[in-house]
Image (spheres, rainbow, N blue to C red):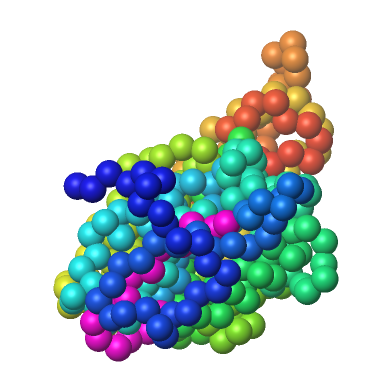
Amino acid sequence: MPIFTAANNIPTIEKLALASLPKGSLNYYWLKIISDGLGSPICIPLMVAKGIHEGPVLGLTAAVHGNEINGIPVIQRLFAEVDVSELSGTIIGVPVVNVPSFIRKKRRFNDGVDLNHIMPGKVGGNVSEIYAHRFVNRLVKHFDYLIDLHTASYGRINSYYVRADMEQASTRQLAMLQNADIIVHNPPFDGTLRGAADAMGIPAITVEVGNPGVFQKRLIRSGHEGIHNVLCHLNMIEDDLEPANKPTILCKKSYWIYTERGGLLTVHANLVESLEKGQKMATLRNVYGQTLTEYTAPENGVVIGKSVSPVNQSGGRVLHLGVV
């Protein structure tokens, strides 16, 4: 196995000339997006596998939020295994979209903005808007399909679940191929990378691959399996689909439940647990250990994600409930 060092001179580019890449090639680049305060380039790592045969372009993105890193080894593993001599079409992998936040191990961009709330950015905008605009226009425009890999935010944990517009046949199929625990019907909305892709006519789904700031082997395997199934479905590789080990739970909507007062929170419900209306799901205590509030399920549903941070002020998240 080759050892990659700076001496390998991975090239820096300002745009991806996809049509000029040779067929049957595996390519690594630094894609320049912006410059920092010293004028040094801030670059996004880029991986491009171009197959021998014609086919669609599948885009894979991770770490739009800088501390959501489970998607990185999903993309790495796929590129370590891909055989371009048998590949139809092209896979473009972006293991880290939000480089400034990734370096700082933070969710938000370095101007304090959530990058996934301002897509596709704008020309002449502020720091984060220019970054978002150049990312979309220099890279996302090449995609025919997009799988955007995320995780829970700090202080919370997630099941392995998908957000997709289940009323669109193309995105519904992408979602079902992930063999996820849960799929939430969630039409794309303005500001997200998925929404920006949809506005460009690119079918896109968001895959939530576990928890922030850690690598989780089981979920990384699951994410890789879902992408493998998409490659099979799009006839980019010739292989068998990986079947689901259990049925996926389909939710018509989902929402977070919040606290009305502060205290020390314990969430009793487990991920993917089915809850009945009125079932106790969390307890809030004061600093003396006295019970302040017991939270119960407002309706029947399934636990998609939950808070694991005990210190919870008024308006803090309790539990992400999916309505089946």
Q: At 52% across and 54% down in the image, what residue appears?
A: 96
- Whether 270 is among the magenta residues is no
Q: At 74% across and 47% down in the image, what residue appears?
A: 38
Q: Quadrant of residue 281?
A: top right
Q: Nearer the viewer, residue 15 or 302?
A: 15
Residue 164 seen in render:
no
Q: Position of residue 317 (x, y in %)?
A: 69, 42
Reply above or below: 306 against 83: above
Q: In the rendered view, does 92 fall on the left or right side of 186?
A: left
Q: In the rendered view, does 120 fall on the left or right side of 184?
A: right
Q: At 75% across and 25% down in the image, what residue appears?
A: 263
Q: Position of residue 288 (x, y in %)?
A: 74, 11
Chief secondary structure of the magenta span?
strand
Q: In the rendered view, does 71 fall on the left or right side of 113?
A: left
Reply above or below: 166 against 115: below
Q: Position of residue 155 (x, y in %)?
A: 61, 35
Q: Nearer the viewer, residue 21 or 304?
A: 21
Reply above or below: 58 against 33: below
**Residue found at the very far top of the displayed protein:** 288
Q: At 58% across and 33% down in the image, what residue appears?
A: 308
Q: Quadrant of residue 120?
A: bottom right
- The boundaries of the magenta stretch are 43-57
Q: Position of residue 287 (x, y in %)?
A: 75, 15
Reply above or below: 20 against 102: below
Q: How many marks?
A: 0
Residue 228 seen in render:
yes
Q: Quadrant of residue 14?
A: bottom right
